[in-house]
Image: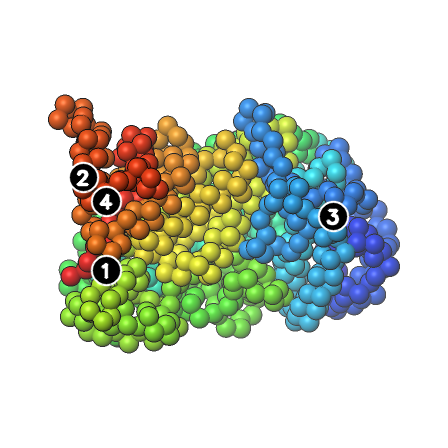
Amino acid sequence: MNKLHEIILKIFFEAIGVLRHRAGRDKDFSLKMEVFSAVEDMGLSSIETMLVENDAIVDEFISLACKYSLPDQNLTLEIPGNIRLKTIFSQISMDNSFESNLVYPLNELNPEILPLKIESIKEEDGYEGLYKKIIKSSDKITDKDFSDFNNTILAFSSFLEKYLFTVPFSPEFDSVSLFDYALSSVAIATALYRYHEEKQDFSGIEKDDKKFCLIQGYFSGIHPFILANIQKTNKYAGKILRARSFFISISSEIIAHRICNLFQIPPTSIMMNAGGKFTILAPNLKDTQKKLLHLAEKVNKELYKINYGQTKFVFASHSFSNSEFKGKSLHYVFKELCQNFEHKKSLNVPDKSKIQKEIEKISTNELCHICSQHSGKQDSNDENLIICSICDYMKSLGTKIAQEDSVSIFEGQKLSLEDSIFYKEKEQKIVFDISYNKPFSGDIQKRLVNYIPHYTNSPIENKKFTLYEKTFKKEENSRIPGTPMMFEYIAASSLEANVSKEFLIGRTFLGVLEADIDNLSQLFTIGFGKFCLFTNLLNLSRTVDYFFTGWLNKQLQAKFKSIYAIFAGGDDLLLIGNYLEIYELAYELIRRFKFYSGSHNDVHLSLGIYLSESDNYIEQITKKVRLEIKKSKLSEDKNAITILGISMANDTYIKLYPVWQNFDSLIEGENSVRFLLKILVWIRMSQSSKKANLDWQELYKKHVTRKFGDYQNHVILSKLPQEIEEYGNELSVPVSIALYKNLKLY
């Protein structure tokens, strides 16, 4: 075991020791440490010896790393039983005026875990229960046959993240997670050690030199890569969209690992990695820029083969010194990094004329029907479809994602991105568990939102789809239970069937939802002010990403089963589903994120929803939803949503969402959907300045009295004129949704 391995293990085991002490289990050594037996044949005794023996060099690196991780603070073993980890949003404020009373319960990290109001926390739900869980799951680590240190330490890091994320560092720093403190200390110690190891000089460790380098990497042009050019056919569209999104996520992981290999540091130095963007803390070695530039050139050559430079790997770096780990100094480090990164991104503008010339080289008859960018051959399953090798690879990858619980990547430098992704055993691999919310498997956890709607055995669903096929004279689809549902049937899942009279009610609309956090880069660079610490930056990245990969994933798996996750993670998402579920999910998303962030005024969530017929091409409808979310971002309300071309504040959407169900109930029985059309007319009249439209309320009274009689005590109708005046065009959204749901489908 080398010195660097010893440093990393000591820091991680110290974190476990803190939990054990707080649980009152100081003498309990049942957490099996033979997890590391595969690494240089380290047995239990060598680990125990390492933990109790003092090595001056090792201890000095650990001491400095912990100091830089959380300056001027000491790790607190003793902590009051009622202290819980505060949500990281409590530390963010652009104007120093925000406070939050939200905290995490002491529990393992899982999709169920969301911050709660502090008064909801029970003191007895504490450290001993959490410690018992970590003991129970430890055999998944100890029984694993790890092949190298990188795989071992990453799996162990995933294990610690699951059980130490909700543990607060100290009463004074109760927004700092014990896991983030340990992980940032490991990354800092690693960079510091490798800097001195490269120089072959371990003196002057505290000397204030530029020993550290932050590296940020990102795939510029992710949206065009995932969404573009699915235009001549929707054949395999779902599989290919899913595969492209997955490919970006895993390729980001592969490139981050390759950078770690360049600097001879373990992947625990990858401090953040979400949404195709990663940040690595590396040593500031000789030829750092040259190494990164060479790797970027290699990756971009591979990407050029896929879409002629429309998607590029962009990196930026910034070196800094020991003294800049503190407060506002670290704030400026990240600010410089972000500015450098944005400049690099701005230089990567695709050459459209060059792209067109590449495409024009291909015969029209040979052009791939899916991407329209490469020459292809006849598809093995469809003689009318021309498909290129890249789209065929994505089709295969999209199929495997739905079937597999794990994926492995090759760490070497020679293979292409495509050749680095495996589902079978391979030498020099790192295995990721991509399953949803299963017990800890012993593999590295890779959180992905890759939910896919499937056909079921539901008699109601089968009758509905059979009637749908009969109504539109379509060939009967096999609809094998457990297989992915086609977009056409996702749209049809919103229909209601009157089987006895053989007609359908509703509209076969797909709903496309895009959402993102507008100002996340600002929150990272200036949101923390004097509290700008590596631990806080790690926490914010995980907290935001976990809202999408944790909470959202749970919602799709449990409730919104007709929604297809194209991508979600980092700070944004794109979902396609039946329009009624999309409409409801947007309501839940806004409501839950508002609570999740503590109603923080500086955290802005923008959303756009576009409704489309299911036979429109995916590229077209995703372009439309991008226009909708742009309208939301331009809104004065900041937190806004645009749907049916109408923008409104998120709070307004929350208020109006239940209203559509009120309108839905109005047309039961003999009342026809024409009444909903009347409401839309009255809404338009109320917004008009024409004199003829100013008496709309009188028209309303006459019509409603004639149709419903005395309506003054009617729960819905008595309030409707006031709601029309208050909300105007915004009210037409729930009315239209109710109308679409109740129109007879011919």
Which residue is drawn at the image coordinates 84% and 46% (left, top)?
56
Mark 1: few/some/many CA within 10 Å (<14, 14-19, 20+):
some
Q: CA distance from mark 1 to mark 2?
A: 26 Å
User: In x, y percent, where is residue 445?
Assistant: 57, 59
Which residue is drawn at the image coordinates 68% and 65% (left, top)?
137
Is 80 or 285 nearer to us in this picture? 80
Amino acid tagged 2:
His
Amino acid tagged 4:
Phe
User: In x, y percent, where is residue 455?
Assistant: 35, 70
Q: CA distance from mark 4 to mark 1?
A: 24 Å
Is 96 or 394 nearer to us in this picture? 96
Q: Nearer the viewer, mark 4 or mark 1?
A: 4
Q: Which mark is residue 505?
A: 1
Q: Which mark is residue 703?
A: 2
Going from N to C along the chain, the mark reached first, 1 or 3, is 3
- Does 91 appear above or below 299? above
| Position of residue 167 in the picture relative to residue 635 (left or right) | right
* Residue at the spot of label 4: 708
Mark 4: few/some/many CA within 10 Å (<14, 14-19, 20+):
few
Q: Secondary structure at mark 4?
A: helix
Going from N to C along the chain, the mark reached first, 4 or 2, is 2
Q: Secondary structure at mark 1?
A: strand
